[in-house]
Each structure stands twice: as C-alpha cells, then as structure tokens.
Image (cartoon, rainbow, N blue to C red):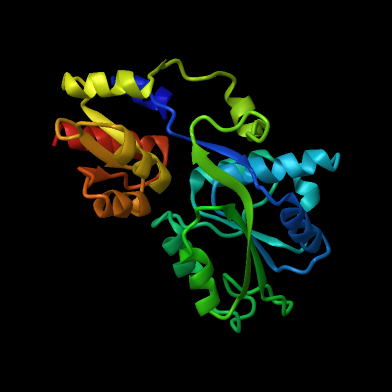
Amino acid sequence: MAAALAEAGAEPLLLPMIDFERAPDQALLSAALDRLAAGEYGWLVISSITTVRALKEVAATRGVGLPALVPPGVRIATIGPSSRRVLEAEGLRVDLAPAGRQSAEGLVELWAYADDAGAAGGDGAGITRVLIPQSNLAAPTLAEGLDARGWSVETVTAYSTVDYPANPERRLVTSLAAGEQAGQEARAVVLSPDEANDELAAGSLDAILAASPSAARRIHDVLHPLEKTRLIAIGEPTAAELERLGIPAATTASAPSPAGIVDAIARSLNP
C-alpha cells in the first residue's frame, strides 16, 4: 500500500497500531489441523493474510510446508485478491473468492447451500464440515452465514490480534512467500503515536487509512484530534466500525487492495 501511494504522488506515513501473536491455545489449533489433514472437512476458509502466516508457522514446527496441512480433496475459500495472491504464492489453490464484494458477506453470498452438491459451495462428496481458523477478534458473520446455509462450521483461534507491539516471545514473525517475491520493503516514514498526534494537531495529515476494524478501534482510542483529516476505510466492515465509533469514514475503498485504496484516497482528496 505504501509503495502504491508513493507512486501515485502521496507521502505515506506508517503508524503501527495492532500486532499479532500466536494463538494462546496451540493444542486446539493443532488438533483442528490434524482433523483437516485427516480429511474431516470439505472446506478450509482462510479469511486473512495473517491466518496464512499463523498456519505456515504451525507447518514449520511440523517440519513441512503449508500445502502439507491441506489434503488434496479439501477446497479453499478466501476473501479477496490479496489473500488469494498470498495463498497461491504458498502453493495452495483457491477454489472460491468473491470478485465483487470482497468481505465475509461477499463470500457467504457466493456460497451454495449444503444440499446443493456440486455447486459453488458443494463438495459433491457429502462432507459439509467447514474449518475457519481466524483471529480471536473475528466477527461471527462468516460462520453464521455458512451455518445458515446448512454447513457444519468449526471456528478455531489461529492467532491473537493485540495492541502494538506484540510480546516478542509470542509474536508472529513467519515470512510469506509473496512478500519475499516482492523483494523489498516500501520506504516510508514510521511515526510514533505522539508524532502522529502532533501532525494531526498541525493539520498536516490529509488522510488516515483504517485497514481493519481492529485498527479503527485503535485509531479512535489513540489519535486526536481527527476533525481536520479524512478517514478512509479499507472495506465495509471497517467503515461500519468507524461509524459505530462516531468517526465515520469519508470514503470506503471499492476493493481492499493497494489500487482500491489509492483510488479511494484520490477520490476523497480530489472529488
């Protein structure tokens, strides 16, 4: 995102707000992945890039690559192009992902009913169990939506979302193949909360991007004043959280991707 913004003529400033730690109960996650390897699930839903990192870390502790956790008969669903790209770089095939509404709601809309064997959500083999490894703060939208369509959904905490910085002993540090292929980190200034608030007080920040509902909550708690800047939401769930917090977004990205974010910021600053 920082590289795309810089290329478009913006000055990206990074402010770490949230971080990620391994799930506190690794035994529960490990047991769910054992059931996955045994073919007890028809679908695996990976709804975030951080989930990929958490699962890759578990695979590494077992001395295997991420694809070894997923047997050939299991289908994989995800939320959008960024997570699809990351999964494919790790060697996993994505069978279902929304192209339009890239959110949990968009994925549920695509998903067939459990008795519709062979369709988008049917596995054709009578396995109607779905595994969703996720954040400890994940909304129930996806699980409840698939449950309403007749699927047997099991959620398991794959990682914990925490305030930045994470505990060094529990922090997720496993790198992703997609990041390694990119070859370089985007060059951008990293601010502290105090520095960001000084910039806000001076009215020198034109926009703040909220990249997740968790980040939206931290923005509400940490950054002040927000009246002189525009808030940009990466997607509908983040926009809804900003609205709930009383700091509505000026605009929402049409797609949760670097290009979508650049477009949203450009539209907000230059209507």
Q: Is residue 88 visible?
A: no
Residue shown at the point (70%, 68%) measured from the top left: 42
In the depicted structure, whether residue 225 falls above or below residue 27: above
In the depicted structure, whether residue 136 falls above or below residue 129: above
Query: x, y percentage for residue 37?
Result: 81, 59
Residue shown at the point (75%, 44%) measured from the top left: 58
Residue shown at the point (40%, 35%) measured from the top left: 258
Horizontal side of residue 99 vs 5, given as left or right:
right
Q: Is residue 129 visible?
A: yes
Q: Quadrant of residue 130?
A: bottom right
In the depicted structure, whether residue 142 falls above or below residue 114: above
Q: Nearer the viewer, residue 83 or 246?
A: 246
Q: Nearer the viewer, residue 83 or 162?
A: 162
Query: x, y percentage for residue 83?
Result: 55, 45
Q: Farthest right residue? A: 63
Horizontal side of residue 50 vs 36, given as left or right:
left
Horizontal side of residue 243 vs 212, given as left or right:
left
Q: Quadrant of residue 52?
A: top right
Q: Farthest bottom residue? A: 115
Residue shown at the point (61%, 39%) measured from the top left: 21
In the depicted structure, whether residue 42 falls above or below residue 165: below
Query: x, y percentage for residue 90?
Result: 69, 40
Q: Nearer the viewer, residue 270 or 20?
A: 20
Quarter in which the C terminus is drawn: top left
Quarter in which the N terminus is drawn: top left
